[in-house]
C-alpha cells in the first residue's frame, strides 16, 4: 500500500473503495491476470470493518461476526490463514419486558406470556415461509413484491397480530438489530430480503447462529491481508472526485474509464464502485449516470446505530451464571452480548442502540449519554456494568466515508421499483458492496460474495475482446457457474 502524488496509472480495472468487497474483487481480478488499482479515501483499508486499540483494549469498531452459512467469508478466511473462535454464550440470557420486568431465561424464545410467545412463533413461521418462497436473489420479481413493498414492516406485523409486545420483539430483530431503522421506515419486502439473505428469519432470531464466531485478531485483517497481497496497487488517502466513462465503441468494442482522485489518476477499461450506495453521489460522473440510477440512489440510505464497547477487569457476569446476552425492545440498549476478545482475561460487553433510540442518545451530552447507556447495560447485567475501565462508542453515522450503518436499504416501495437495476453495470462501471448482496446481505460475507461476483462478470466481459483473459480461472475461484 502506498500514497501517490498525482501519478498517472494505466490499469485494466480501477476499484474505488478498499473494503472487503473491493479488495476481494481486486484480488480475484489480479489472480486472473488483470491489472488493478484500488483507490481508498481513508488512511486505512477495511471499509466498515475496523479493528482498533482504544485505551489499551482491542475493539472491533465495525463488522465482526461469522455465521455458519457464510461460506464465502469462511472460505476467504481459510485462504488468508485467519482463525476464528466462538462467542461466549454459556449461562442465562436476560430479557427486559416493556414494563421493565427483568427475567433470566434459557432457550431461544423470550420469557413472555403464552399468547405473546404463540404470536411470536406464528410471525416467525410466516416470515420463514415468505423468505423461502421469495428468496434473496430477486425478491422484486416475485408476484407478491409490490404488495409487500408498499406496506411498512411495522404495519404489516400489526395486520397479522394484535399483540404489541410480539410485534415489537419481532421488529427488533430486523429494524433495530439489522437495518437500524424504525420498522415504519422500510417495507415488509425489505424485511423478507433481510431474512432470506440469512437463510431464514429463524436464523436472524437465533443469536447463537447469526453471531456464532469472531476472527482472532479482528475482522479488519481480511482487508489488511488482501491489501498486503495487492501491495502497491492499493492507494490510500485517495478519494475519487471524478469518474469519466465511455461505453464500448461500436468501432473497436472497447470501453474506458478515468478515475481522478486526490493523489492519482487511473486510466482503465472498467471501474468498480465498491462503496455503499449513499456515497455514489460523492463522485462526479462524466457524463452523468442515467436517470434511472440517479433516482434509485436517492431511495437508498443507511440506518443509524451506536455500537457501545465496555471493557471490565473481569467478565463479572459469568460468575453470576449469565451469558452476557440480553434483549429488550423497550430499553435504550436493545441488545447486549459478551464480546470478550480471544485469550483476554478482561471482559468486554458490546451493546447496540439503534434508529430512534440512537436519535435520543445523540441528543444528550457525551457524559449524559455514557451514563444512560451504562445504566441500561446495568439493567441487564447488574451494577458492576456501571464502571468499565474502557468505554467507547462506535458512531459510523458521523464517519465521513461511511455515514451510517450497517448497510443501505430502500425506503418504502423502493426495493420492488429499483432492485432489478441495482447490480446492473452502467457501461464500464460495476457496483460491488454488501449493500447489494443477496446471500450475506449487509454482512462481510455478502461483501466477499459481491466482490467475487463482480470480478467474474468483468472477466467474462473482458474475454469478449481479449481471449487471453483467464475467465475460467476467476469463475472457479469465485464459485460462479456460467
Image (spheres, rainbow, N blue to C red):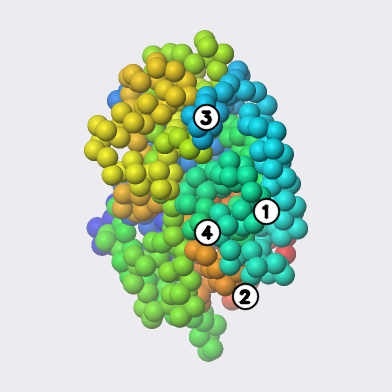
Q: Alpha carbon of mark 4 to alpha carbon of mark 3: how far?
A: 26 Å
In the rendered image of this protein, does residue 341 appear above or below residue 82? Answer: above
Return the residue at label 1.
160
The number of numbered badges drawn on the structure is 4
Q: Mark 4 points at which residue?
A: 186
In the figure, 370 relative to 427: above or below? above
> Which of labels 4 and 2 is toward the front?
4
Give the spatial CA distance, label 4 vs label 2.
40 Å
Q: Who comes first in sequence, dot 1 or dot 2?
A: 1
In the rendered image, the residue lying farthest to the bottom is 251
Mark 4 and mark 3 lie on one chain; the one further toward the N terminus is 3
Q: In the rendered structure, which disc, 4 or 2, sits on the residue that comes first in sequence? A: 4
Residue occupying the point 52% across, 29% down: 96
Q: Tell me if mark 2 has few (under 14), some (14-19) or many (20+) residues whose alpha carbon lies within 10 angstroms of its own.
A: few
Give the residue at x 44% y 52%: 303
Choose mark 4 or mark 3, whichever is in front. Answer: 3
Q: Nearer the viewer, residue 247 or 11?
A: 247
The numbered dot on residue 183 is none
* Residue displayed at 25% across by 36% down: 366
Task: Tell me the tag on residue 464.
Answer: 2
Specify few, some or many for label 3: CA neighbours under 10 Å numbering under 14, 14-19, or 20 or more.
many
* Labels 4 and 2 touching (C-beta < 8 A): no
Q: Judge left or right: residue 350 versus residue 73.
A: left
Residue 88, image quadrant: top right
From this viewpoint, is residue 155 visible? yes
Q: In this view, does 293 lie to the left or right of 107?
A: left
The answer to whether residue 29 shows anywhere in this view is no
Residue 470 in which image quadrant: bottom right
Label 1 vs label 4: CA separation? 17 Å
Instruction: Say which mark, if any, is on residue 96.
Output: 3
Q: What element carries label 2?
A: loop
Amino acid at each position: 500500500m502506498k500514497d501517490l502524488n498525482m501519478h498517472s496509472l494505466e490499469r485494466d480495472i480501477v476499484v474505488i473503495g478498499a473494503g472487503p468487497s473491493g479488495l476481494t474483487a481486486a484480488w480475484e481480478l489480479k489472480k486472473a491476470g488483470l491489472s488493478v488499482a484500488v483507490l481508498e479515501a481513508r488512511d486505512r483499508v477495511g471499509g466498515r470493518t475496523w479493528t482498533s486499540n482504544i485505551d489499551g483494549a482491542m475493539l472491533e469498531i465495525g463488522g465482526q461476526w461469522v455465521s455458519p452459512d457464510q461460506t464465502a467469508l469462511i472460505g476467504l478466511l481459510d485462504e488468508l490463514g485467519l482463525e476464528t473462535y466462538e462467542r461466549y454464550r454459556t449461562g442465562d440470557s436476560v430479557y427486559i419486558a416493556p414494563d421493565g420486568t427483568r427475567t433470566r431465561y434459557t432457550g431461544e424464545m423470550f420469557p413472555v406470556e403464552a399468547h405473546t410467545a404463540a404470536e411470536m412463533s406464528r410471525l416467525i413461521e410466516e416470515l420463514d415461509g415468505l423468505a423461502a418462497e421469495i428468496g434473496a436473489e430477486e425478491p422484486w420479481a416475485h408476484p407478491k413484491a409490490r404488495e409487500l413493498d408498499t406496506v411498512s414492516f411495522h404495519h404489516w406485523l400489526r395486520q397479522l397480530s394484535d399483540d404489541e409486545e410480539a410485534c415489537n420483539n419481532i421488529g427488533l430483530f430486523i429494524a433495530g438489530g439489522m437495518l437500524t431503522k424504525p420498522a415504519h421506515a422500510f417495507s415488509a419486502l425489505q424485511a423478507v430480503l433481510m431474512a432470506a439473505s440469512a437463510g431464514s428469519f429463524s436464523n436472524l432470531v437465533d443469536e447463537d447462529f447469526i453471531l456464532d464466531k469472531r476472527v482472532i485478531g479482528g475482522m479488519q485483517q481480511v482487508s489488511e491481508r488482501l491489501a498486503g497481497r495487492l501491495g502497491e496497487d492499493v492507494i490510500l488517502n485517495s478519494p475519487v472526485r471524478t469518474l469519466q466513462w465511455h461505453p464500448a465503441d461500436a468501432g473497436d468494442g472497447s470501453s474506458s474509464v478515468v478515475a481522478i482522485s486526490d493523489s492519482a489518476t487511473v486510466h482503465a477499461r472498467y471501474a468498480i464502485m465498491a462503496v455503499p450506495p449513499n456515497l455514489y453521489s460523492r463522485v462526479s460522473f462524466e457524463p452523468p449516470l442515467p436517470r434511472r440510477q440517479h433516482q434509485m440512489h436517492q431511495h437508498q440510505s443507511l440506518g443509524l446505530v451506536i455500537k457501545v464497547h465496555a471493557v471490565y477487569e473481569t467478565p463479572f457476569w459469568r460468575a453470576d451464571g449469565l451469558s452476557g446476552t440480553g434483549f429488550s425492545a423497550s430499553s435504550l440498549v436493545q441488545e447486549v452480548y459478551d464480546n470478550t476478545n480471544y485469550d483476554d482475561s478482561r471482559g468486554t460487553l458490546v451493546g447496540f442502540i439503534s434508529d430512534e433510540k440512537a436519535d435520543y442518545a445523540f441528543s444528550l451530552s457525551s457524559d449524559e449519554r455514557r451514563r444512560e447507556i451504562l445504566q441500561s447495560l446495568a439493567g441487564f447485567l447488574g451494577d458492576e456494568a456501571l464502571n468499565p475501565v474502557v468505554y467507547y462508542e462506535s458512531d459510523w453515522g458521523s464517519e465521513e466515508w461511511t455515514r451510517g450503518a450497517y448497510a443501505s436499504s430502500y425506503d418504502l416501495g423502493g426495493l420492488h421499483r429499483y432492485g432489478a437495476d441495482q447490480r446492473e453495470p452502467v457501461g464500464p462501471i460495476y457496483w460491488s458492496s454488501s449493500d447489494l448482496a443477496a446471500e450475506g446481505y449487509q454482512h462481510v460475507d455478502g461483501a466477499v460474495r459481491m466482490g467475487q461476483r463482480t470480478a467474474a462478470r468483468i472477466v467474462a466481459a473482458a474475454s469478449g475482446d481479449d481471449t487471453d483473459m483467464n475467465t475460467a480461472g476467476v469463475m472457479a475461484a469465485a464459485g460462479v457457474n456460467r
